[in-house]
Image: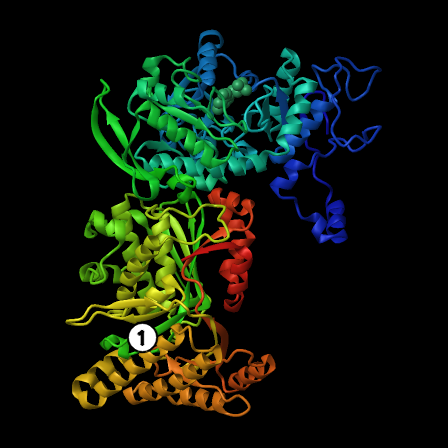
Amino acid sequence: MASSTGYTTPASPSSSEAAHSLTSSLLRARPYRFATQVATVDNPDPSHKDQYGASSVPIYQTATFKGMGGAYDYTRSGNPTRSHLEHHIAKISNARHAFAVTSGMGALDVIFRLLKPGDEIIAGNDLYGGSNRLIGYLKAHGGVTTHHVDTTNPKSLLPYLEDPSHNVAMVLLESPTNPLLQIADLEEIARLTKRYRKDAIIVVDNTMMSPYLCRPLELGCDVVYDSGTKYLSGHHDLMAGVICCDRDDVAKGIAFTINSIGNGLSPFDSFLLLRGVKTLSLRIDKQQANSILIAEYLANLGFKVNYPGLKGHKGKEVHDRIAKGPGAVLSFETGDVALSERIVGSTRLWGISVSFGCINSLISMPCLMSHASIDPAVRAARNLPEDLIRLCVGIEDPADLIDDLEAALLEAGAVRVVDEGMGGRARLERIVQDGEGRVVELANGTLQGEEAHGAAQAKLQKIITSAPGKVILFGEHAVVHGVTAIAGAIDLRCYCLAESRSDGQLSLVLPDLGYSQTWDIASLPWDKVGALSSTVLKSGPKSDAIPDQELLTLLANQFVHQDKLKAVQAAQAFLYLYLHLAVSSGIKPAQTYTVRSGLPISAGLGSSAAYSVAVASSLLYSHGILPAPASSPSADSTIPLEHANMVNSWAFLAEKVIHGTPSGVDNTVATLGGAIAFRRAVKGREGSMDVLKGFDKVEFLLTDTKVPRDTKTLVAGVARRKLEEPDTINPLLTSIQRISDEAQACLSSTTLSRSEQLDTLSRLVEQNHQHLVSLGVGHVALESVRSKTKEQPWGLATKLTGAGGGGCAVTVVPDGFPEDKLTALRAALANSGFETYATSVGGRGFGVLIPAHASQLETAEGGVELSASPQQKRFEEAQTEELGRWAEEAGVWVCA
Ligand code: PLP
């Protein structure tokens, strides 16, 4: 209902009306969500239809209205454009009454006029400077005294509330405060105040939050006002204030004052504010997401940052209860006023300006600007640091905001480059100075840089890596004893998505193993992790490096789901790498790592190596040790070999954590792709690894018998037999070496025809399988697969692959083998309870995804927005067999 001054929500419909609307449609009865409400302007008085059906509320730029007894007569008392705005503000604030006035201070002035001489106010001690100025005026001219208390502690109001000699008529609160971002428990303070002073008016300056993030009336407060100049308008093109309340007596007093003094908002500014407010939730979502990234960036550099989005911010729990988000204002201290002035003066993108809430980012020093009206002694008494820098974050690209801030920090001498780092990245370190500007300490720094988007960027991006599984074509088991193994990458892969988060936590999610765990980064056993030498950091751990058993034992106690052995081993390897890379790189990225397996787990297809390689590469990128590939790769972009080697050596360490004594062949294939001949180093002889150059892709059918087995036990069993029955086992190993040699020669041959190559391959497959059975790692299920594939009309050669004792079998599929025949074979195998995968051997090594659309990168940079992206949902929830297609569609893979 439009009133002469302000808007009052009509009484709710009678119960029969309500019942009618419910029966008409349940869906229609459902209230709109905030984003819908704020974007949709309704007519405050449906009986007053716009004569032309204007979609946008017209500006009634008139002082007077003709006639007598109409809804409006004089714009000081009421104006249709202002009524629309006030109706809209009441709606989005869930308030009974709303008023629009000429500024935020105008709003507070109107509210203060509810008081009379002799009344007392209890107010916070970190109030907006303008509010303090008005309070001073009120004391001198209105006989109203104010007691400033620490509102972060509700009990600090009690001395005034409990003592009847204090005539407490109003409580004035802000949360979070500006600029220290202190949190007041509005709900608890309202409850306490009402207990002692039923009639006192609890007033909240909600400018920092806006009705999108906090609605104090719902928390028991009486009057809420916002400087509409800020988030409600969003564009710094008008001054306005809005007031909301539910109490009719209070509304009556406010309406009287506005009409009497004439500070109702003008029609033109009402129009502008109504236009601006429609995008409120959209703007705040983006501004907030940017703020989180910037707050983390500064906190990582060691600055004291005030922001309720940061873990550890005092009162965060209270804030999270009373508000929907941390907002987009933060402040930080540099330790030196002159330094702060230099930083503020050196920024280019950040506008030096008072105020906040605009779509453009602003930087200021409150003590010199917005809060300069507070006496310096009072500022000191209220712990308002003179060097404080306030950042009001806009909707720009966060990478540009961080780049500009970083340039300003460097120019001002707040940080310095201590290490250009590998791959062109620089490590920044904060310089702490004494009062005279002398460097007294170098605080802990973080990796930041320039390249591709710099490490800051790398930290903001989501990173998706992947690595292939492998089949051992020849030489499994024997490889442990120094025999050559021939292995090739398959096109079933493992994928790792690393996504930044803002709460100081680290998560590992393994949906395929039904496992997920989150660690508080600060509480990981950092004191047990030694920094790596610079050579290890440059090229990765040596191949003979042994994981630190003491640390592994300590880590073993960190896991929930102790019953899920595979997941726990995977998590142990992950944490082991994370800790070492963090200690050495100087950053401890808060991230969620989600790893999906597109290949059967524990089936002898190198799923753990694919996991180790995908995770190791992801961690190396996340820690800024490897530079992420360029965001627009050329068609032939590949990962440089030295980066691949680095990934391989870390993955090998992870494999050792998982398996004890792996040969290294799996992780090497998962890293490099293609096919290799691999010989591990044994006593008295060096290891070797030859890439099979001429190797062309070969099609294989993989059959998972689904018979579980334990690789460690099988490997140990062969080793034991070698010791106990050398005369049986050693000739078998020699024979396998001959098979591998022949296979290597055949697969690299330039003289043999393709069909001769495939025939040789089939013959060697048969022979090698028999040797493996003789080594004692066969299984009846594997024999059943073999006999099925050998049957006519198929007639194909099959061997077990990997550790045997169950697991997978591999069948050579000659070129041109009819598709329908293969389908029939797969159906026959499926009939026996086996799962088949048609794959080729010899594909690409580990890779990094460059998303197909720039917008995907955009969302990634937004950090928090990523979690809502359909792409991630698809990644986490996709069926295993869908992962390959998903990966192909997601973008370009730059691979080793
Ligand atoms: N409240 C807060 C928290 C503010 O920051 C400001 C202005 O900066 C105001 C109130 C006053 O608003 P206005 O400038 O619209 O009068």
Of 344 and 372, nearer the camera is 344
Farthest residue in the left direction? 684
- Examine the rendering and report whether any part of residue 564 can be seen: no
- Residue type indicated by callout 1: Ala
Which residue matches tag 1? 485
* Residue under the image location 15 percent in, 72 percent down: 683
Q: Is residue 50 left or right of residue 177?
A: right
Does residue 786 show up? Answer: yes
Q: Is mark 1 within 8 Å of ligand 1?
A: no
Judge left or right: residue 409 versus residue 208: left
Place residue 282 in its image quadrant.
Answer: top right
Of residues 616 and 224, the one nearer the viewer is 616
Note whether 59 is above or below 491 in the view shown.
above
Residue 424 lies, in percent from the top left, at 34, 40
For the residue carrying disc 1, how many other residues have a C-alpha within 10 Å: few (<14), some (14-19), or many (20+)? Answer: many
434 or 2: nearer the eye?
Answer: 434
**Quadrant in which the N terminus appears:** top right
Name above or below for residue 595 compared with residue 762.
Answer: above
The quarter of the picture where residue 48 lies is: top right
Q: Position of residue 777 (x, y in %)?
A: 31, 85
Q: Is residue 714 above or below residue 653?
A: below
Q: Which residue occupies 50% across, 80% down?
A: 814
* Number of residue marks: 1
**657 above or below 414?**
below
Picture quarter with the C terminus: bottom left
Percent position of residue 619, x then y: 35, 52
Who's the residue at 81% across and 29% down the image?
Answer: 50
Q: Residue at x 43, y 43 (%)?
A: 460
Q: Is disc 1 placed on a helix, strand or loop?
A: strand
Where is residue 766? Give x, y as percent.
39, 87
Give whichever of 602, 94 is nearer the camera: 602
